[in-house]
Image: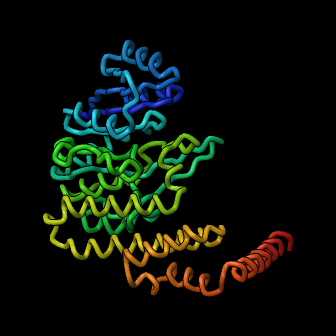
Amino acid sequence: MANTIDVAIPCYKYGAFLTECVESVLSQENVEVRVLILDDCSPDDTEEVGKALADRYPQVEFRRHAVNIGHIATYNEGIEWASAELFLLLSADDYLLPGALARAAELMTAVPDMSFAFGNAVMLSDDGKQVESNPLGSDPGAIPTILSCTEFVRRMKGRNNVPTPTAVIRTSAQKRVGGYNRDLPHAGDLAMWLLLAAEGPIGFVNTPQAVYRIHSQNMSRAYSSTRLPDIQQRYAAVEHFLARSGNRLPDTKSLRATLMKDLARESASHACSAFNDGDVQISLELERLARHLHKGVWRTIPGLRILSRRAMGQRAWQVVRSLANGYRNRDLKRAVFR
């Protein structure tokens, strides 16, 4: 008997991508799918496209919100609707690759308590350039197929390394965890993967499972470029996970230390980048946050870098940086033209 998978497709101003997304789900083999298109009151042609798809395919249902309710509430509506064995939340601007759902379902059938399975993704930019994303590294021999919660957390390194369109979730685990947190509008995915990891093992499919579009309208992309709020939201996501699931984990203290150290290193790294850009106040705030997250951050490479730059001063560092870039460019020219 084929696995049943419910796929909720939130859509806001992605009418141009919607047909490709839906048909990539319907063309999946060896699984039975239902699709719910959730149009969050889009001002483009999403309504026309969505209704046409629902008329054409009996597996497709279309709903349109009378007013825009935002992505978190829309995601949660999809979670409430799901009733099949497995569930996928797929943004309308992304699409699945052939065989993706069957590969994830096979892995999850083999491990009945697996909470979710994810895989590699192809990152597609507006100019047509494609780059494969390997969230657990590119060496197949070094990647376990099944991860415990602890292994998963350590590999995440405080980031959302799970390509969302590849994440097929066991619906019962999703129902236990519940919906997305309204207080984490920009780190909800990270919090969700962590919470699900506490529900059971995680599977990894070491092959491209979906195409993730990178374009100017990506909310996550725009937000992650704002260094301080990005780290603050991820910190809040980690605290949310520990508060809800920490008492059920055997190594909560170690996990907390790992997560905080990872976030501190990245906060220090962002502080270096802000310092390079002349964003002194943001750099200072990121430095303070890094110290708060992990007092030993100054013994790490990012911590030592920001300390040395701060000691040197903005003006002196810019001179040194300019000289270093000059030498680097000169060496590059020599390598190319010799």
Q: Residue at x 42, y 20 (%)?
A: 50
Q: Residue 210, image x and y in percent?
A: 44, 43
Question: Furthest residue to the right?
Answer: 338
Residue 315 picture quarter: bottom right
Q: Residue at x 38, y 65 (%)?
A: 158
The mark tally for this picture is 0
Front in this rendered view, residue 206 or 279:
279
Q: Residue 320, image x and y in percent?
A: 73, 82
Residue 104 picture quarter: top left
Lateral position of residue 117 relative to residue 280, left or right: left
Question: Furthest residue to the top?
Answer: 55
Residue 104 makes an appearance in the image: no
Query: Vertical placement of 314 versus 47: above or below?
Result: below
Query: Vertical placement of 278 versus 109: above or below?
Result: below
Q: Residue at x 16, y 49 (%)?
A: 112
Question: Furthest residue to the front?
Answer: 281
Q: Residue 126, image x and y in percent?
A: 62, 41
Quadrant in which the C terminus is drawn: bottom right
Front in this rendered view, residue 204 or 19:
19
Colour scheme used in the picture?
A: rainbow
